[in-house]
């Protein structure tokens, strides 16, 4: 998809990868709505982006994606303010929480509800204009992560869901893509770096800058291969899995 003139909603867009994806869309001539629980940071990021890319290019909407009604309403507000939206990036995520269900709610359930809401908005058979849904999983959605089994379960879920729902909604003009980065320098990772075992592990895998993940995101959006899963590790970008062939 060419991003010029396109409007995107990005969950967890106040910082980190979400902010990086927003900058790429704005640099390409699009507009963004940032949804996040962090209100002052979200407003600050939207202000920064408006100053850089032009007033009205970015809006911030406070939203906890685990609250389905508020998430639905935030998407409606984004559509009203921007005129519509062509892209939803389900990016909000956390690594761990004392209640494992919170991790599953943010990292997996909200990806599913966001996808369902966006399909309803985009579906061409009901007056929508089609669109792209990009779900952010992780390298920990492709390989075991004994340090973070619940996080891995949520991210494996995102891969399985994206590969399954993509073909199911293609006839509606909607494509679902999935990005699986390994470690990147964002607060999600840097807050844990004082832990020596974690730091050694991250060093062994390599730590990407946000720009390298954003470059993979750009490839995924440009290629628009429905139900594809793109993994990005330091210096290596690779589509995973074959297209599903059998109707089993
Ligand atoms: N940084 C990495 O190494 C890495 C690697 C692979 C995948 N990921 C995934 O990328 C996504 C973005 O991660 P990041 O590294 O930018 O993390 P981050 O912590 O820097 O940013 C995540 C953002 O999500 C927001 N958020 C959290 N819970 C939310 C909720 N309930 N509702 C709305 N917003 C919420 C946070 O406030 C924050 O602004 C996550 O899904 C993460 O799992 C990150
Ligand atoms: C150990 C992984 C979870 C750490 C949580 C913090 C940040 C997570 C960022 C990324 O999404 C993780 C990306 C890649 C990790 C992939 C595999 C890790 C395997 C680790 C292990 O052996 O336990």
Image (cartoon, rainbow, N blue to C red):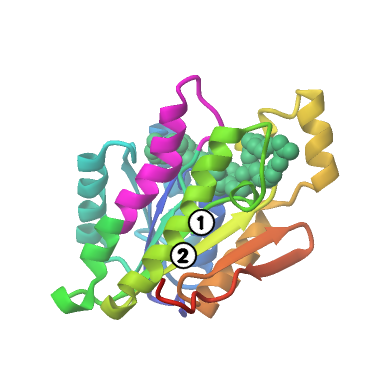
Q: Quadrant of residue 6?
A: bottom left
Measured Cα–Cα span from mark 2 to mark 1: 6 Å
Which residue is farthest top?
98
Where disc 1 sits, the SS reads helix
Q: Is residue 25 above or below residue 200?
A: below
Q: Are marks 2 and 1 in contact (CB under 8 Å)?
A: yes
Most common SS among magenta residues:
helix
Crowdedness of circle 1 by 10 Å Cα count: few (<14), some, many (20+)? many
Badge count: 2
| Range of residues picked out in magenta | 94-115
Q: Quadrant of residue 241?
A: bottom right
Disc 2 residue lies near ligand 1 with CB under 8 A:
no
Which residue is farthest left?
126
Q: Which residue lies under the disc numbered 1?
A: 159
Which residue is found at the position 23% from the left and 58% from the top? Answer: 81
Residue 163 shows which numbered tag? 2
Where disc 2 sits, the SS reads helix
Does residue 108 show up magenta in the picture? yes
Which residue is found at the position 30% from the left and 49% from the top? Answer: 113
Does residue 110 show up magenta in the picture? yes
Counting from the top left corner in percent of width and height, residue 135 is at: 46, 57
Which residue is found at the position 59% from the left and 34% from the top? Answer: 149
Please name whichever residue, 147 or 124, is drawn nearer the observer in this view of the structure: 147
């Amino acid at each position: 998809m060419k991003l010029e003139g396109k409007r995107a909603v990005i969950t967890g867009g106040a910082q980190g990868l979400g902010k990086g994806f927003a900058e790429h869309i704005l640099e390409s001539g699009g507009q963004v709505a940032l949804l996040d629980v962090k209100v002052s940071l979200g407003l600050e990021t939207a202000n920064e982006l408006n100053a850089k890319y032009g007033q009205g290019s970015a809006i911030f909407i406070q939203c906890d994606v685990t609250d389905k009604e508020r998430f639905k309403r935030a998407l409606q507000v984004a559509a009203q303010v921007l005129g519509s939206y062509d892209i939803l990036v389900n990016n909000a995520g956390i690594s761990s929480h004392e209640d494992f269900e919170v991790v599953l709610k943010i990292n997996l359930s909200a990806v599913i509800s966001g996808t369902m809401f966006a399909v309803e908005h985009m579906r061409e058979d009901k007056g929508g204009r089609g669109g792209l849904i990009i779900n952010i999983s992780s390298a920990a959605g492709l390989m075991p992560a004994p340090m973070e089994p619940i996080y891995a379960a949520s991210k494996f879920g995102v891969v399985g869901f994206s590969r399954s729902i993509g073909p199911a909604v293609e006839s509606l003009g909607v494509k679902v893509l999935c990005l699986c980065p390994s470690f990147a320098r964002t607060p999600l990772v840097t807050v844990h770096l004082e832990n020596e075992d974690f730091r050694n592990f991250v060093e062994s895998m390599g730590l990407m800058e946000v720009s390298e993940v954003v470059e993979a995101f750009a490839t995924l959006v440009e290629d628009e291969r429905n139900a594809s899963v793109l993994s990005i590790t330091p210096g290596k970008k690779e589509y995973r899995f074959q297209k599903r062939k059998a109707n089993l």
